[in-house]
Amino acid sequence: MILPLKPLNGGDTRLPIKGRTVTSVFKATKQGPHYRPGNVRTTMLLIRLLYQMIINFLSILKLRKFYKTRKKNRTADEDISVIFYSDNLDEVNGIANSLRSVVPYLRAKGKKVQLWGSAFHTRTNGVVEDSFVVLFPRAASMEQLGYADSELAFPQLAPVLRFLKHYPADIMELETPSPGAWLVGIAARIAGLKVISHYRTDVPSYTRFLVKEAWMRRYVLNYMRIFYQNTTPVISPCETYREILETEIKVKPEGIKVLPRGIPLENFSPDYRKLPETQRNRKVRFIYVGRISVEKNIPFLEELWKQFCDKNQEIAANAELTIVGGGWYLETLINNMIEYSNVYFVGVRTGKELAELYANADFFLFPSGSDTFGNVVVESLASGTPVLVTDKGGPQDVIKSAEEKCGWVLPFENLSEWENQLKKCCEIFKTPEYEDMRKRSVKHSQNYTLEKMTTALWEFFKKL
């Protein structure tokens, strides 16, 4: 049992997320307010964040003294301890899913790692999920513009400080530049931890998609610069975003470390493909997996499919598109595609269901230009399904790094280029060339295993 928790006894009233189990609940405490999204209202979060720092400042100084003593008493052969902190663990997203794979993998290898975040306003208490994901009681939160079921939430600092003493660490890696990361990161730095960051979200691009006011976009960019310039080294998942960190975020080159990510590839396999040889006249299957929202460039995918079907009716009659996922743009997309009977919406899928959808598709379409890595791209490759990605963002690095072709990198939002490639896909998907591409896709995905990723990551931590 993790202090200061009590056994699960109905203290958390929210319906569980599939695949996650609440194993402990924090003692009941007064939760902070939850605000509707608004540019000006963000100042309320700042005020409450400063309040948390002020009322806990003496406790932070006491913790600093504790850490100084701890460092003096450490032995040379003692392994390091690391905390991963992310504010968006209490939802379903790529960052949360990735961390929920990496951390237990490291723990199974005997590494001292912890995964911390903040509970969302839909919970009555802070909780621990699956005995290793700590979601602290919430101090305040705000709905996040453009993200269904997501929040800008940050925790009460007092229980965080108690955990930092009960479970001391050497390094804290901040996963998102959000209010909770500022609060917990500053407290950890004062206490004496090495605080670094990971560039997991292309916030400037998301802001350009979702925020109309120019002053707010400038504010977010400056906010990002201050955050990442003060949490170096910054881990970048690819070379593309290393360049963006240098040019847009103004992080010095020596403050950036490129470390590709890894995923649990054992969950995905071409063996899930169930297409009998007798189905020689079956349709070519395209698939998209991910959040259904504007920043994922879903309106472009919508326009692309419409143009492909309208201009190539004979070819499109033998093609279909499956949309996997949920998001705030989903209802709009369904209404806009109602006249296209070759488009299927299956909602959010996980586990074996998702693996089968990947494997039974012929091509994966990923038009996003704001993903820093693209876990779904590697998942598709591991399933033997070649991918189409844009020349903007991180997924292009995954495809370009392949020794042999396992997909295509196409110009961002270039309708004619994408339409032509869809036609070519419909021509080659039953050829030996396509089958070779499927095999190459699986082979290339092996470069992104959890073993390779965590080994490189831990060596980097030890050098720090």
Image: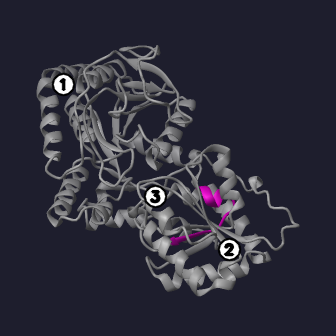
Observer-side mark, 3 or 1, equals 3
The type of residue carrying mark 2 is Ala
Mark 2 and mark 1 lie on one chain; the one further toward the N terminus is 1
In magenta segment, residue 386: yes
Magenta stretch: give its range.
379-389
Q: Number of marks in the image?
A: 3
Give residue 382's quadrant in the image: bottom right
Determine crowd level at label 2: few under 14, some 14-19, many 20+ residues with C-alpha closer than 10 A.
some
Mark 3 vs mark 2, CA separation in Å: 23 Å
Q: Which mark is residue 38?
A: none
**Residue 54 in view, yes or no:** yes
For label 1, the residue is 60
Q: Which mark is residue 331?
A: 3
Decide which of 80, 227 is in the foreground and name it. Answer: 227
**Residue 266 in view, yes or no:** no
Q: In this view, does 279 lie above or below 312?
A: above
Give the residue displayed 43% in from the left and 56% down from the top.
237
